[in-house]
Amino acid sequence: MKLSDTKATLSFSNGTPSMELPVYSGSIGPDVIDIRKLYGQTGLFTYDPGFMSTAACQSSITYIDGDKGELLYRGYPIEQLAVNCDFMDICYLILNGDLPDGEQKKDFDNQVTRHTMVNEQMHFFMRGFRRDAHPMAVLTGLVGGLSAFYHDSTDITNPTHRHISAIRLIAKMPTLVAMAYKYTIGQPYIYPQNNLSYTGNFLRMMFANPCEDYVVNPVVERALDRIFILHADHEQNASTSTVRLCGSSGTNPFAAIAAGVACLWGPAHGGANEACLNMLEEIQANGGMAKVGEFMEQVKDKNSGVRLMGFGHRVYKNYDPRAKLMQQTCKEVLAALGLENDPLFKLAMELERIALEDPFFVERKLYPNVDFYSGIVQRAIGIPTALFTAIFALARTVGWIAQWNEMLSDPEYKIGRPRQLYSGESARAYKKK
């Protein structure tokens, strides 16, 4: 960031002397007012619930312009990356700052491939969970438990250790997600196979069994790879901020990523695509296409308690660029699997049509987001609804670990310590009753 010629002046109506605040500019996006000396000079804090007007860090990884519907990874538009790259290209880009050349890609792919197995004792760890445990509960425990098995790379002051941990987390997350799935359905774990792609390997670990192997469908493989790409990073969202805040205490990377997994579980964050598919299935069960109009009228009634899932976004105030790509992917997968007449997809298209034409939704800029179509794609592939958020966590791991590593490399980083506006009792003396 660079110091701007513009300065902000904070003035007070009670006679307190005004204060001049420096303004910094990034490469693109809004300028920021530096308030680090505010408390020391005035005794005041700022108040910003949800941190909607607060930049807690500087980052060079991902940029979002919500009004334009723009998403950039290291400066590259998501629309270009999603159609020209695979997920390993994106992982390299997010971790290293630029796309790999041929030799770099080959070396990176090999590093990840050679770390996909997990310690055999993780199988015994799994047995402590109930068979009907939610996959996200299992995944949170497994990721946090990695530090007990791979403590040889947890020195966060050592860049080599941080790199090894990054590779391990990216490589092992598909294995852990597939293990969590196999455990819940009572099937044996399928070990990674080094001659497959990252995404193809994950599909095989999910759907193969010892009785017959699984042949990866290239259309399905590409679709899931695109889901991974679209979810790889998304600036300072709730789970990323959680990883940074957790990591700021100096904890090991596995613990920090486990915190991100736990945060992602929330239905307002990573659980949104699961909630969206549940909504579509409920509409279908209650009458399908004949009831779509009635459902949308209920959504507009604030007293009905009915919510439209998969529309609107905390940051995007325009069409989510990832949703456009996901809609096209959805069509490709359904066609390849002979599911063009899928009733849930038809419902989704009708909900989108109404939302883009009805003034109620248009005025509120409630456009479809990436969750709206990704759930349909995953359902078509055969991924159970309860596993959707774990797939999200798998994809987002590279963004989390890159953000964590960037924070540790920042000379200005400090342990996170938000302030508060206290509204409880003032000091009072104890009286025995």
Image (cartoon, rainbow, N blue to C red):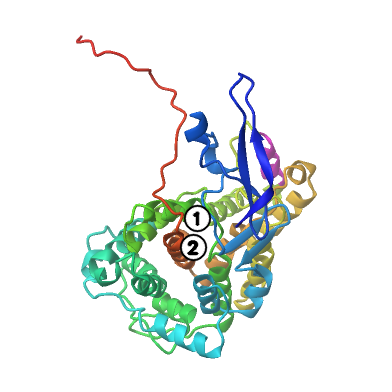
Percent position (x, y) of residue 254? 33, 63
Q: Earlier in the sequence, mark 2 or mark 1?
A: 1
Residue 380 visible, this angle: no
Tell me residue 298's x, y (percent).
66, 38
Q: Of residues 251 and 257, which is closer to you in this image? A: 251
User: Front-most of 247 and 22?
Assistant: 22
Q: Is residue 20 magenta?
A: no
Question: Helix or strand or loop: what does disc 2 sit on?
Answer: helix
- Whole-angstrom CA distance, mark 2 to mark 1, is 7 Å
Residue pointed to by mark 1 = 270
**202 up-or-down from 309: above or below:** below
Whether pointer 2 and pointer 1 mark residues with C-beta atoms closer than 8 Å, the reply is: yes
Say which quadrant the C terminus sits in: top left
Give the residue type at disc 2: Phe
Is residue 376 among what the camera can see? yes
Q: Where is residue 150 in the image (x, y as percent from the top left)?
A: 26, 70
Identify residue type, mark 1: Gly
- Rendered image: mark on residue 392: 2
In this picture, residue 204 sits left or right of residue 120: right
Q: Position of residue 110 (x, y in %)?
A: 42, 86
Segment tinted magenta in the rendering? 293-301
Instruction: Report the predominant secondary structure element of the magenta stretch.
Output: helix
Q: Residue at x 58, y 74 (%)?
A: 223
Q: Which residue is drawn at 43% across and 64% down?
A: 405
Label 1 packing within 10 angstroms: few (<14), some (14-19), many (20+): many
Question: Could you say which disc has been placed on residue 353 in the image?
Answer: none
Q: Quadrant of residue 369?
A: bottom right
